[in-house]
Image (cartoon, grey):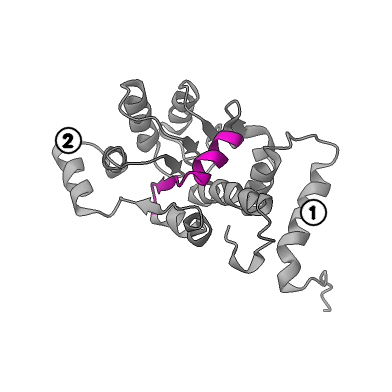
Amino acid sequence: MKVTLENVLPSEIERRSFEIITQELGDRELDPEQAPVIKRVIHTSADFEYADTLCFSEHVIEKALDAIRNGASIVTDTQMGRSGINKKCLAGYGGQVYCFMGDEDVAEAARKNGTTRAAASIDKAARMDGPLIFAVGNAPTALVRLYELIQDGVLSPALVIGVPVGFVNVVQSKELIMKTDVPYIVARGRKGGSNVAAAVCNALLYMLDETRGMGNGQEQRQT
């Protein structure tokens, strides 16, 4: 049986994928600033529901890009999320990507305080200097701890990407972040994941690269 496939060079697959996404979105009008984030999340997940469920605080794209330009680092709640973020691109702006989930001091703090490692990792990150972006794709307890620290005036993130996936406290934790006055990008509902968190980060990074004329950089792109 002969199989007929679309003839696309490997270097052109991403470009063609985004063409298909744009076609399938049809006449739907996306906010021009938000569109690159929404489309990259759809590209990562093949799930068009994100066009409806991704929520953006006012002027969040502008604020997020400014934070990255000013050397913001990204803190994730999984090694998978950390692996998916284009670290070389972020380093070009002076930032790094961190995940503290496997650190011994985080495990000890979680045991001592009766919390999750995700919550303890947020406490560790809160002691860092400089602007911070939190990319949470797995642990709702990380979002809950962020909410508590924000409300207590201990932490003021440059951006919170709240996209954990699952069933227990996932929806509620996202809604908490949307009640704060910090910049956020949240995937409302149960859907999300570490790959989605990384995709949001990369969309922002690639938007910056395009504005400073670095070209497509397809060979270095992730997620």
Q: Are marks 1 and 2 in contact (CB under 8 Å)?
A: no
* Residue 83 point in image, percent of width and height: 45, 60
Element at badge 2?
helix
Q: Quadrant of the C terminus?
A: bottom right
* Residue 111 point in image, percent of width and height: 16, 42
Q: Which residue is mark 1?
A: 20
Q: Nearer the viewer, residue 131 or 152?
A: 131
* Residue 149 point in image, percent of width and height: 32, 27
Element at badge 1?
helix
Crowd band around label 2 with a 10 angstrom C-alpha radius: few (<14), some (14–19), many (20+): few
Residue 141 in the magenta stretch? The answer is no
Spatial separation of the CA atoms under disc 1 and disc 2: 49 Å
Crowd band around label 1 with a 10 angstrom C-alpha radius: few (<14), some (14–19), many (20+): few
Picture layout, residue 42 above or below residue 3: above
Tag 2: amino acid: Asn
Tag 1: amino acid: Ile
On the image, which quarter does residue 2 sit in?
bottom right
Picture layout, residue 151 above or below residue 204: above
Q: Which residue is mark 2?
A: 113
Which residue corresponds to the image point at 60% horizontal and 36% vertical from the top-left? 61
* Residue 137 point in image, percent of width and height: 46, 44
Q: Earlier in the sequence, mark 1 or mark 2?
A: 1
Judge from the rendering whether residue 106 lies leftward or rightward of residue 176; answer left or right.
left
Judge from the rendering whether residue 108 lies leftward or rightward of residue 37; answer left or right.
left
Q: Which residues are magenta?
A: 62-78
Residue 76 in the magenta stretch? The answer is yes
Q: Which mark is residue 178?
A: none
